[in-house]
Image: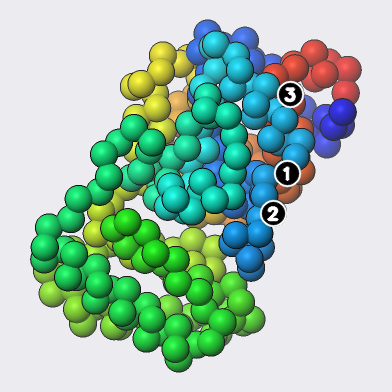
């Protein structure tokens, strides 16, 4: 059994409170939250102890568990294997298993191809940079470039190329941890959480994430909800834990608040 002693008292009390909610949404980011960050996007897996806790929570009738990732739904499915009671949400909320696939106009399709070409050009100039293809966009991963300077240089080059082709300002961009992402369809984790809330009657939401793109999720939480930031960096979340290992402990405390009283 994982230990709960490293979770701060205030957070433990809040987890005990929401565990008694009539209807709870547990929304979790994947990379850096359930899984340690890695330069191999396909090799990462959620920590086994978190997988166990997620399955246990998802088997409750009053709890909805959703994994909300910036990855495309396809890329998310390659790295997670949960039972069907766990909802998978990709592309920061743009893709769910029940939503119809993204449909682009002909002009948007051409623009998307130019956007991906711009990514390939930057990749050719900066060996080690990785391109992630998404249904309505693309992302440049710079974790393997080694220095902040190289990352900034590669991102600036890509921003310049995209600005040249985006005459009608149709392309949105956002930064994550060593990732710069462009999309023709805006969506964010705040919208994804609101959609879950309207779909499932819930008294409270627990949302956990590690990246700047998770801040949209923390922004829509109410005082009944609990937001937890994983790791360093500015945040709107009320609480913070140090690592994915502690995320597993948090999930255990939601499922089993009595371990809260006897850490
Ligand atoms: Mg993350």
Q: How is the image coloured?
A: rainbow
Spatial separation of the CA atoms under disc 2 and disc 3: 20 Å
Quarter containing the C terminus: top right
At 52% from the left and 79% from the top, the residue drawn is: 129
- Mark number, residue 253: 3
**Residue 244 visible in this rendered orientation of the protein:** yes
Compared to residue 149, the image places residue 240 above or below, namely above
Query: Earlier along the polypeptide chain: callout 2 or callout 1?
Result: 2
Q: Which residue is mark 2?
A: 36
Neighbour class for label 1 at 10 Å: few (<14), some, many (≥20)? some
- Residue 75 drawn at (x, y percent): 49, 53
Answer left or right for 125 relative to 165.
right
Where 121 sits versus 14, above or below?
A: below
Q: Position of residue 151 (x, y in %)?
A: 52, 79
* Image quarter of residue 244: top right
Query: What whole-number distance in Å separates the C-alpha atoms at marks 3 and 1?
Result: 16 Å
Mark 1 lies on a secondary structure that is: loop
The disc at residue 47 is: 1
Q: Which circle, 2 or 3, is nearer the viewer?
A: 2
Is 92 situated left or right of 151 in this image?
left
Looking at the rendered structure, the secondary structure element under dot 3 is helix
> Can residue 190 be seen?
no
């Amino acid at each position: 059994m994982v230990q709960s002693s490293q979770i701060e008292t205030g957070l433990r009390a809040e987890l005990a409170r929401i565990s008694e909610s009539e209807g709870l949404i547990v929304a979790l980011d994947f990379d850096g939250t359930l899984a340690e960050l890695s330069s191999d996007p396909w090799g990462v897996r959620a920590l086994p102890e978190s997988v166990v806790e997620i399955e246990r929570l998802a088997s409750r009738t009053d709890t909805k568990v959703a994994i909300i990732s910036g990855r495309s739904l396809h890329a998310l499915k390659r790295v997670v294997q949960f039972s069907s009671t766990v909802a998978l949400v990709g592309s920061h909320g743009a893709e769910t298993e029940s939503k119809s696939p993204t449909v682009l106009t002909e002009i948007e399709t051409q623009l998307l191809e130019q956007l991906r070409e711009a990514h390939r050009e930057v990749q050719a100039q900066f060996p080690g940079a990785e391109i992630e293809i998404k249904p309505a966009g693309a992302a440049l991963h710079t974790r393997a470039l080694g220095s902040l300077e190289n990352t900034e240089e590669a991102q600036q080059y890509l921003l310049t190329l995209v600005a040249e082709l985006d005459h009608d300002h149709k392309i949105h961009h956002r930064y994550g941890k060593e990732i710069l992402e462009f999309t023709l369809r805006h969506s964010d984790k705040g919208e994804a959480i609101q959609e879950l809330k309207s779909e499932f009657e819930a008294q409270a939401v627990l949302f956990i994430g590690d990246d700047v793109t998770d801040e949209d999720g923390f922004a829509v939480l109410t005082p009944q909800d609990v937001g937890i930031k994983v790791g360093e960096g500015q945040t709107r979340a009320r609480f913070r834990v140090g690592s994915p290992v502690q995320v597993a402990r948090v999930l255990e405390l939601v499922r089993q608040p009595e371990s809260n009283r006897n850490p």
